[in-house]
Image: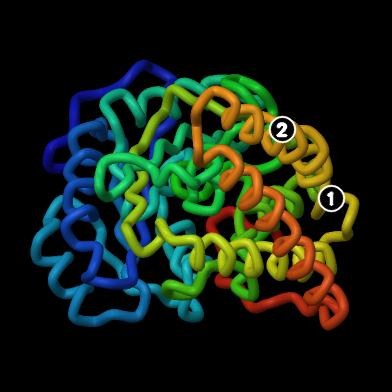
Amino acid sequence: MSGATPGGAAGAPALSVVVCTYTDARLAVLTSALAAVQEQLTERDELVVVVDHHDELLARLAAALPGARVLASTGPRGLSGARNTGVAAAAGDVVVFLDDDAVPRPGWLEALRTEFTADAVTVVGGGVVPDWEGGRSPRWFPEEFGWIVGCDYRGMPGDGQPMRNPIGANMAVRAAAFGAVEGFDTSAGRVGALPVGCEETDFCIRLRQAEPATVVVRRAGAVVDHLVPATRQRVGYLVRRCWHEGRSKGFLAARVGAADGLSAERGYVVRTVGSGVLRHLAAAGRGDAAGPVRAALLAAGTAVTAAGYVAARSRAPEPVPSPRPRLRGARG
């Protein structure tokens, strides 16, 4: 592959980096992301770019990336369908997923690769640092809500610790895992700009239910910078994202059970939100006038998320398996 570095350590897994994209509005940051990936590939690795139902963008990227495999999504419109297309095409021992608006830092790919030299590790979540358009986060934004913009957040597991599921912008999955659960549920996750999610949560829960020995760990040193555009730096977006997150969790709980679907959220609300509200209120005493605003938004956003969850659970249909492409190594 063009730009690939030689070899890699003997016995180290080969990696397939899958980047899914759906709009030419992100072309500038996508170009930077793909260049950063190509600089870190070894001869045994590959870059797979999946274009989600956008023929013009598909042709443009295919012409611009002769060293990569550029594919049209064969699944339903949305991130889950595109990821499944990438998994089905991937040849590596590990499939690495990178968002099209996240740029890897140097050493990112090797940090992920190193984790998979341990046979027990199944899924790894890397560090996702917000790259705020404008240079810094709004003063009113509580860092406990980093997940709202798809980034690391205060209260998440520390480096090397186990976690229920990674942030989808930067995660890696051992390819053999897709033989236990056939990919991402296309009834879950983001479609275009609609701020829904939980496809990674759903995948990891189903994987652990199918294979109880599954190990999911966080590797904070495998870092990407995730663009947060000005359109996501508004209170209205925060509220809307909280509502859709609650709804997503409600439908997730209907599919996989509330015990698994909310296993991380209970502790987050009790420990992270509770202490965060107090911490932001205390900041006002140190001259931070935005502290009470952050406290109020943290409490209000949590309440909106809970309301979305309740609304979804009251209307959630019985789980119906969604069609998924047959993935490499799938059983049956």
Q: Which residue is mark 2?
A: 278
Measured as percent of width and height from the top left, residue 274 is found at 77, 37
Mark 1 or mark 2: whose residue is earlier in sequence: 1
Measured as percent of width and height from the top left, residue 269 is found at 78, 43
Q: Amino acid at mark 1?
A: Asp
Q: Dividing the picture into quarters, in which one does residue 118 lie?
A: top right
Residue 97 vertical placement versus 116 (above, below): below
Residue 35 vertical placement versus 55 (above, below): above
In the foreground, 164 or 42: 164
Q: Secondary structure at mark 1?
A: helix
Residue 81 vertical placement versus 167 (above, below): below
Q: Which residue is mark 1?
A: 260
Measured as percent of width and height from the top left, residue 104 is found at 30, 37
In the foreground, 320 or 250: 250
Q: Amino acid at mark 2?
A: Leu
Q: Name the residue at 19% across, 27% down.
A: 5
Question: CA separation, marks 1 and 2?
Answer: 28 Å
User: Around disc 2, counting alpha carbons within 10 Å, would you say few (fewer than 14), some (14 to 19), or many (20 or more)?
Assistant: few
Measured as percent of width and height from the top left, residue 264 is found at 77, 42
User: With 213 as the anchor, is 176 left or right in this view?
Assistant: left
Q: Dividing the picture into quarters, in which one does residue 105 lie?
A: top left
Q: Name the residue at 46% across, 79% down.
A: 77
